[in-house]
Amino acid sequence: MTLMEFSIFPVDKGASLSPYVARALSIVEKSGLDYRLNPMGTVVEGEWEDLLRLLTGCLRDMEKDSERISLYVKFDHRRGFSGSINSKIKSVQEKAGRKFNI
Amino acid sequence: MTLMEFSIFPVDKGASLSPYVARALSIVEKSGLDYRLNPMGTVVEGEWEDLLRLLTGCLRDMEKDSERISLYVKFDHRRGFSGSINSKIKSVQEKAGRKFNI
Amino acid sequence: MTLMEFSIFPVDKGASLSPYVARALSIVEKSGLDYRLNPMGTVVEGEWEDLLRLLTGCLRDMEKDSERISLYVKFDHRRGFSGSINSKIKSVQEKAGRKFNI
Amino acid sequence: MTLMEFSIFPVDKGASLSPYVARALSIVEKSGLDYRLNPMGTVVEGEWEDLLRLLTGCLRDMEKDSERISLYVKFDHRRGFSGSINSKIKSVQEKAGRKFNI
């Protein structure tokens, strides 16, 4: 399984990006993949091919009305792991012996 | 105010990174800045100079026992905004007319 | 056409990453896509689907002997543009009225 | 020494970003630090504090006429290394036993 964080936005639509982020999030939601929205991006866990399919869906939707799109993605790919979307935070908190803001 | 997401980790310590992330999070916590940990990074809101001071603190701590360090940072800098660490998610949810997983 | 910059490396192989980068670059080279290597990543221009296929090829090769892989990608997607791998630098230099180090 | 790649652009100025990139590059040039422009960002080598000073200079200049700014930075920090802006590419080419496009 792979953990991915991505942010996608139109460069040609001015400073108010939330309507575009909302559209992308609806596509994430429909994918059925486990995800978490944060103030700077969306983290999704899934199989590699499913994650790429999701990115493609978001891009194809956004290009309908945007001339130029920026997309930033980071992947954390681990053999034989799943559930990392929850376990990574737990593991950090166990190592620190305390809870952090999530 | 500026919103920043960062992830910092040693490249020379193998695949188990949570002890290092825990140390960085403790420095974030001590900074007194508003932050949220997510599975792929930590989002922090603050004045530009305070955010750079935080990054410097995390780097100086990690280089004590790491030979090579990767640090990824994205900044969203908006004039005259504050509280974005909460309001960005709210705004996306309002535009979508629904709640997303956070 | 889409412009993409990516960097991929194993997290579990220590601080010397160049053998792994070399393998990825050989895959880029074989793709036939136009690319430029820089000290922090590789920029590639191509159709969206071809770029994703290239990332998949690099990941599948690296996971053969790496337990954990980090992959960072940024995309600049523009409708109706091609040749951006050269024209973006030209355009910046024209606006500045001077040459920069490339 | 630290190697950094950054890209900075206004989110509220439409799809033509090259005038803003040109201004940032002029600030990089004046810093006296060793740098290379590529189609997706600028790589700079220097001491950590000098790199942060450069980012601050670019941000302060851009916020004069931009309401919202995106800044992406990745750092590769290695103890006891310098000249990496040239040696990383050399090292990859040596491992591959061939030259790549740069």
Image (tube, coloured by chain):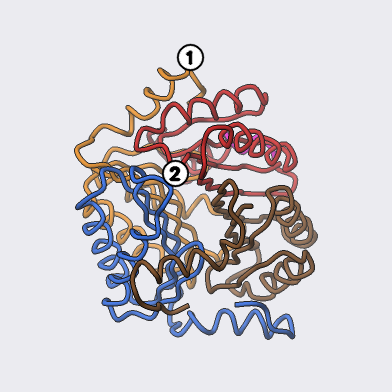
Chain colours: A brown, B blue, C red, D orange
Instruction: Please tell me which residue is depicted at 38% across the width and 81% down the height of the picture.
Output: B34
Tell me the CA gap for discs 1 and 2: 25 Å
Above/below status of C55 relative to D8:
above
The three-letter amino acid code for the residue at tag 1 is: Arg
Counting labels gives 2
Closest to the observer, B3 or D27: B3
Query: Which quarter of the rendering shows the N terminus of chain B?
Result: bottom left
Answer with left or right where residue B70 lies relative to residue A81: left
Instruction: Please tell me which residue is depicted at 42% across the width and 25% down the height of the picture.
Output: D92
Above/below status of D62 relative to B12:
below
* Position in image of residue A65 (x %, y %): 77, 62
Quarter holding residue D29: top left
Label 1 belongs to which residue?
A: D98
In this rendering, which labeled residue sits more in front, label 1 or label 2?
A: 2
Label 2 belongs to which residue?
A: C11
Q: What stretch is highlighted in magenta?
A: C82-86
* Position in image of residue A75 (x %, y %): 56, 51
Closest to the observer, B97 or D44: B97
Question: Disc 2 on helix, strand or loop?
Answer: loop
The three-letter amino acid code for the residue at tag 2 is: Val
Question: Disc 1 on helix, strand or loop?
Answer: loop
Q: Residue A77 carries which label?
A: none
Above/below status of A20 relative to C86:
below
Instruction: Please tell me which residue is depicted at 73% across the width and 84% down the height of the picture.
Output: B98
Query: Which quarter of the rendering shows the C terminus of chain B?
Result: bottom right
Q: Is residue C85 magenta?
A: yes
